Amino acid sequence: MTFPNKEKCLATLKPFQSILAEIPQKALKAYQKDRLSKITTSGRVKSNSIWGYMIYFARKALGNNSRVQFVEHFGTVSIIIDGIAHRLLFRMKKSDRKGLSGNIQTKLSDAFHDHSQRQIFLLPNIDPDRIEIVYTLDGLGIRVDDVRAVARYGKQIIWTHSIKPEAKIIKSPVTPSTKKTVPSRARVRGDLLKNDTWKQEK
């Protein structure tokens, strides 16, 4: 049995990594503007809608790239990248915090995650490494926390790797102040003592 090789998979993904990392966030924002998000609270509807937007944005960003193929089959879409001496097939999914995607168990999903057999249900003529690009949401479901490449065997995660760029922290220069200030209590008291009206009232 040969599991997806992490180094090869990540090397093949690298030229497309930043694009793939942005797609779930774009899809979520598009869904949030969608009329469906206002009329239903169904988690299944939300996930399916985001998935549809992900495929839309993936086609828009990668559809004209000769190294990328979109394969529509069995009611889903798989994406193939032809790398240098390495071919990678992946699907885009939502996952839990561990990176495990939720799939309705079918022959297709079983074959996708069973690396002991060829991909007879997907592409009978080739046998690429198979992984998933998954996204996780924050606790409120309004922001993408992470986007990862995940290799699985059945329900077991073989390896996982975040492809979301780390946020850059911009440090502003701090100029220490040399001006001496009088403590606020003493300053206020002094101002009041200069006020003749205050003295008369006392």
Image (tube, rainbow, N blue to C red):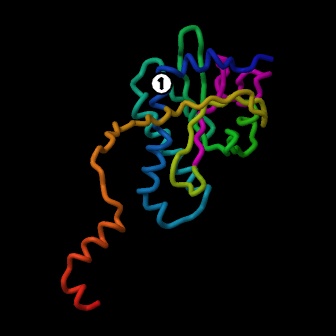
**Disc 1: CA contacts within 10 A as few (<14), some (14-19) or many (>=20):** some
Residue 37 lies, in percent from the top left, at 49, 61
Q: Pinpoint residue 201: horizontal percent, then vertical percent.
A: 26, 91
Question: Magenta includes 23?
Answer: no
Q: Which residue does the image show at 53% across and 46% down from the upper left?
A: 144
Residue numbers of the magenta segment: 112-137
User: Closest to the observer: 26 or 144?
Assistant: 144
User: Considering the numbered disc 1 on the image, is that residue within a helix, a strand or a loop?
Assistant: helix
Q: Which residue, as the protein is rendered here, is positioned at the far top? A: 85
Please indicate whether residue 141 sits to the left or right of residue 175 in the image: right
Q: Give the quadrant of the C terminus.
A: bottom left
113 relative to 140 in the view: left or right? right
Could you say which quadrant of the image residue 147 lies in?
top right
140 lies above or below 185: above
Q: Residue furthest bottom?
A: 201
Q: Residue 116 colored magenta?
A: yes
Residue that label 1 marks: 16
Image location (x, y in percent) of residue 2: 76, 16
